[in-house]
Amino acid sequence: MAQRTTRINQLLQREFSEVLHTRWRSESVRITISGVDISPDLRQAIVFYSVIGSEEEKQAARKLLHKVRNPLKAEVFKRVQIKYTPEVRFIYDESLARGTGLIDVLDQVAEEDRRREERAAD
């Protein structure tokens, strides 16, 4: 059962992303569907999304997903036939932003190390 749920999650992630970026191309350019978590009974689905950009762009993405939730859901579940059409919620996924921040910190540390080595060599 867990393997089936995992496959459904992956399929839904791909379909939500494809429909969103095809139908609402210009508005969704900064949105990434980072994952889907469907309940074992297939009645509820959480769609995780990330946004590249400022706080205003995050708010615009949230508003867009709220506005297009029903037509997006309808289009996805026309393509994906499962026993129930689940209730869909969109939740902002901060992991991409945290990962980007971590990479920035690592880059800063590497730059400081490089400068320290240059000073030591002089």
Image: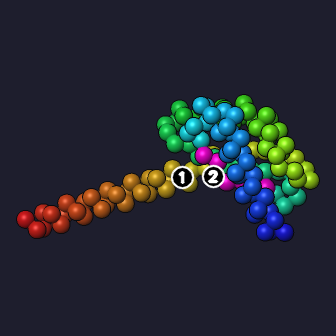
Of 25 and 44, which appears nearest the observer? 25
- Taking the spot 75% from the left edge, 63% from the top edge, the residue there is 6
Residue 122, x across and y down, in percent: 7, 65
Residue 109, x across and y down, in percent: 31, 61
Vertical position of residue 3 compared to residue 91: above or below: below
Membership of 40 in magenta stretch:
no
What is the magenta range?
32-38
Of 108 and 35, which appears nearest the observer? 35
Membership of 35 in magenta stretch:
yes
Amino acid found under the numbered disc labelled 2:
Ser
Say which element carries label 1: helix
For label 1, the crowd category at 10 Å Cα-Cα, with few meaning under 14, some 14 to 19 and many 20 or more, is some
Residue 90 appears in the picture as rendered: no
Q: Which mark is residue 96?
A: 1
Vertical position of residue 90 compared to residue 114: above or below: above
Amino acid found under the numbered disc labelled 1:
Leu
Residue 44 appears in the picture as rendered: yes
Q: In which quadrant of the rendered view does residue 22 lie?
A: top right
What residue does disc 2 label?
34
Which corner quadrant holds the N terminus? bottom right
Q: In which quadrant of the rendered view does residue 106 lie?
A: bottom left
- Rounded to the nearest angstrom, the CA distance separating label 2 from label 1 is 9 Å
For label 2, the crowd category at 10 Å Cα-Cα, with few meaning under 14, some 14 to 19 and many 20 or more, is some
Vertical position of residue 72 compared to residue 118: above or below: above
Dot 2 or dot 1, earlier in sequence: 2
- Taking the spot 83% from the left edge, 38% from the top edge, the residue there is 74
Residue 39, x across and y down, in percent: 82, 57
